[in-house]
Image: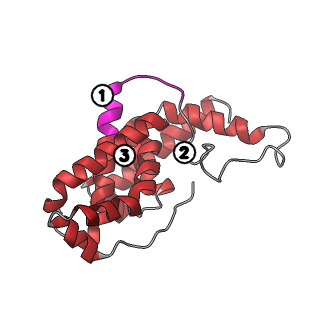
Amino acid sequence: MEATITASLDPTIVERARTGDLVAFESIVRHRMDAVYRLTFAIVGNEADAADATQDAFVAAWRQIGSLRDAERVEAWLARIAVNAARMLARGRRRRSVREIPGLTPETNDVPSPIGDPAGHLADDARALGAALEHLSSDQRAILALHHLDGRSIGEIAAILRIPDGTVKSRLFAARRALVERLERAGK
């Protein structure tokens, strides 16, 4: 999983959005839509739920934008809202469905080429990873997504989840361990 680096939002746009400027908020949405979708997708595991969670996150962000204290921290603030929206959706639906592998959907450019993998090992590995992720809790998927997919540091994750750095480290360790155990059980 590779982090995507994007330019930071202009704080003046964030300030305008905080005062109720819908055009400025739409600029924030356009700037962060893909990142929020990737994050929610990694947590909920399918496109429809990720789209719902992304929409819920931006609606909540619009409602709460006036409470944002530091315009420089808008990305972390929005990530926290997105994580919470995805977790609530995942807990609320409690349904089992086929999980898609984050970053390996046909809409991305990261789809493994079958030409370079004639035996189909990449597809097998992707299925095994998807099955292992299916068995993790939404909280475990969230912390793995924030760190490995979104490329966030321990400190950034702590700020987003509003937990101490040590708690992030222990939860990340536990999530990785759970993922490895699942993969080992599957023989991968």
N-terminal of the pair, mark 1 or mark 2, is 1
Circles 3 and 1, Cβ within 8 Å, touching? The answer is no
As shown in the figure, which amino acid type bears the numbered disc 1? Gly
Residue drawn at the location 80% of the way across and 43% of the way down: 114
Secondary structure under the numbered disc 3 in the rendered image:
helix
Rendered-image quadrant of the C terminus: top right
Magenta run includes residue 123 = no
Mark 1 = which residue? 92
Label 3, on which residue?
54
Dot 1, crowdedness within 10 Å: few (<14), some or many (≥20)?
few
Q: Marks 1 and 2, Cα distance to the nearest angstrom?
A: 21 Å
Determine contact: label 2, label 3, CB under 8 Å: no
Q: Where is residue 135 in the image (x, y as percent from the top left)?
A: 48, 30
* Left or right side of 93 for 96: right
Judge left or right: residue 174 versus residue 56.
Answer: right
Q: Which of marks 2 and 3 is nearer the N terminus?
A: 3
Classify mark 3: residues with Cα within 10 Å, few (<14), some (14-19) or many (20+): many
Residue with the mark numbered 2: 102
Which label was assigned to residue 64? none
Viewer can see residue 165: no
- Secondary structure of the residue carrying numbered label 2: loop
Per the rendered image, the range of residues in magenta is 86-98
* Disc 3 residue type (three-letter): Thr
